[in-house]
Amino acid sequence: MLPAIAFLGAGLGLTATGPARAAETGKAAAAAPAIEEAVLLSDGATRVADWVATAKDNHALPYIIIDKPAAAAYLFDARGKMLAHAPVLIGIAPGDDATPGIGSKNLSEIGPAEKTTPAGRFLAKFGVAAGKQRVLWVDYATSVALHTIPPGNPKDKRKERMLSPGIDDNRITFGCINVPKIFYNQNVSPRFRKKGGYVYILPDSKPLEEVFPRLRVQPFLNAAASSADASLAGQ
């Protein structure tokens, strides 16, 4: 039983993308007119979306799936309906674990290999970061947040990276997840503001089941749901 993955683009300033490398066409969508199309997620993102919607792992809260290999974010409402998607910028270094104690380090103390966006399931809530900036804290302990592109070194060319046609240049942050302003202000903030929500970050190299162990039982849940539907249809 798959969740609804129809993208409702009207009024969001984003368009839908094609299969697997969704972020490549999704980058231009951040500034393109809105249209309504179907969104084809990668296999990993589809499996996680299926599991969350079927098992109701989000506990009636909105959630975001961050597909690191595709450099894309997918926003769902509390019922598992996809509302929007956007390209993302993520940590410079590939990797699925945060360095122990990294949350207490200054940015200048973080080495290149430590600039990872950790994979996993996180309960995210809004809070204040350095400079009194309000951000969506994905994992406060490791200082991983989801927010718009911050003012910083122009040499980073973060906006250009986000809008470029490829995804190889989307690794530029210290570990945080940068998203377009329209996606953040019009979609994420209104839904996560009160109670927060969940963020599911797909791995770079670890097996998906290692990051999300409950995926192992998903085929059995799907089979049970199909059997129940068949029984009801036969009555």
Image: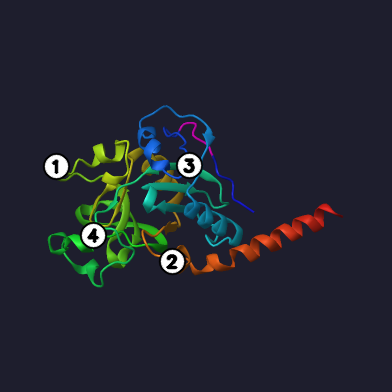
Sequence-earlier tag: 2 or 3: 3
Instruction: Classify mark 2: residues with Cα within 10 Å, few (<14), some (14-19) or many (20+).
Output: some
- The residue that label 2 is drawn on is 211
Spatial CA span between label 2 and label 4: 19 Å
Q: What residue type is disc 3 on?
A: Pro
- The residue that label 3 is drawn on is 19
Spatial CA span between label 1 and label 3: 31 Å
Question: Going 59% across and 68% down the picture, which residue do you hit?
Answer: 217
In percent of width and height, residue 178 lies at 30, 48
- The residue that label 4 is drawn on is 115
Mark 3 and mark 1 in contact (Cβ < 8 Å)? no
Q: Is residue 8 above or below residue 97?
A: above
Q: Nearer the viewer, mark 1 or mark 3?
A: 3
Spatial CA span between label 1 and label 2: 34 Å
Give the magenta range: 7-11
Q: Nearer the viewer, mark 3 or mark 4?
A: 3
- The residue that label 1 is drawn on is 155
Query: Mainly helix, strand or loop, the magenta region?
Result: loop
Q: What residue type is disc 1 on?
A: Lys
Question: Going 42% across and 27% down the picture, which residue do you hit?
Answer: 33
Q: Secondary structure at mark 1?
A: helix
In percent of width and height, residue 189 lies at 40, 47
